Image (cartoon, grey):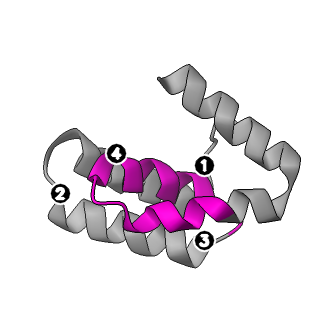
Amino acid sequence: MYDLLVAIERELKARGIEAQRQMLKLLDDPDPGTRCWVAGSVLQFAPAEGERVLTDIAAHVDGLVGFSAERTLEQWKAGTFNPPY
């Protein structure tokens, strides 16, 4: 699924900011994995929204998703976040 998600994000980016902004609706998805992926994806054009969701996930979700949110947020704040899309 990773390759498919990256391809979708590249396509949305190619279509412009309005297409990318459609992802913001998924920040409220009930699945924390979906919210985490989307939050990382929107950091480039909606940093406040992405940071808010990543912070919430890191604080309240255990396991790999919580860890992933924490690491993404750390890398974003350090300026080393380098998404593949």
Q: CA distance from mark 4 to mark 2?
A: 10 Å
Q: Is residue 83 above or below residue 31?
A: above
Residue annotated with mark 1: 80
Q: Earlier in the sequence, mark 2 or mark 1?
A: 2
Residue 71 appears in the rendering:
no
**Residue type (three-letter) at the residue carrying disc 1:** Thr
Q: Are marks 1 and 3 in contact (CB under 8 Å)?
A: no
Residue picked out by circle 2:
61
Q: Give the residue drawn at x 52%, y 75%.
A: 49
Alpha-carbon distance for marks 4 and 3? 17 Å
- Name the N-terminal-most of marks 3 and 2: 3
Residue at left 68%, top 29%? 7
At label 4, the amino acid type is Ser
Span shown in magenta: 22-45
Residue at the far left in the pictured view: 62
Q: Amino acid at mark 2?
A: Val
Q: Which residue is mark 3?
A: 47
Residue receiving disc 4: 68
User: At x 15% / y 43%, what residue is drawn?
Assistant: 63
